[in-house]
Image (cartoon, grey):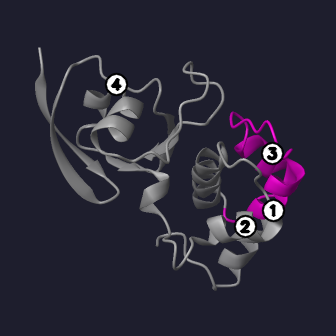
Amino acid sequence: MKRSVTLRVNGEDHCLELEPNELLLDVLRDRLGLTGTKEGCSIGVCGTCTVLIDGRRASACLTLAVTAEGKEITTIEGIGAAEELDPIQQAFVDQGAFQCGYCTPGMVLAARELLELNPNPTEEEIKRGMDGNLCRCTGYYKIVRAVRKAAGTRRAGSGDLDR
């Protein structure tokens, strides 16, 4: 039986009729057209479908959409813009921290959560903070460098993660 739900995604409210078993991943991609959130493993271990719910990392492939009502959902489309990338996105570009790009949205959002919780992480803290996000192409060295660069940009005051 469908339920009327309002989801706040990237600062915008969306009134939807949802089945109780609809996954947030499917609603974002198929109903709202936000295709930056990718499906990877479908069991919550790869990080490809990472979104932020109230600023905390969540696997959209495991989250029932109705449970996100009343919460702020942030997808990759909600940070930065083509004309002005978010500092984390820019750091990924600058460091060459992606190849195919499939995992990149989840990686960027995981890095965003990490830097909100710990603005000055050590390399080990970055590795632990990015745990749960898998990359099959690039390897992790460039990803760690990108997160370190984004943290430095933020500390220098030339980057604001709240864009």
Question: Is residue 156 shown above or below 16?
Answer: below
SS under mark 4? loop
Q: In this rendering, does residue 111 appear at all?
A: yes
Q: Could you say where residue 48 lies in the image, as x and y percent from the top left? A: 60, 37
Residue ranking furthest to the top: 1
User: CA–CA distance between discs 3 and 2?
Assistant: 19 Å
Please say if the residues under marks 4 and 1 sit with CB atoms less than 8 Å apart: no
Q: Indicate yes or no whether the magenta region holds residue 131.
A: yes
- Which residue is disc 3 drawn over? 127
Badge 3 amino acid: Lys
Name the N-terminal-most of marks 3 and 1. 1
Q: In this rendering, does residue 120 appear at all?
A: no
SS under mark 1? loop
Using a 10 Å C-alpha cutoff, classify the residue at mark 2 as few (fewer than 14 neighbours), some (14 to 19) or many (20 or more): few
In the rendered structure, find residue 119 and report the number of the disc placed on it. Answer: none
Using a 10 Å C-alpha cutoff, classify the residue at mark 3 as few (fewer than 14 neighbours), some (14 to 19) or many (20 or more): some
Name the N-terminal-most of marks 3 and 2. 2
Which mark is in front, 3 or 4? 4
Please say if the residues under marks 3 and 2 sit with CB atoms less than 8 Å apart: no
In the rendered structure, find residue 96 and report the number of the disc placed on it. Answer: 1
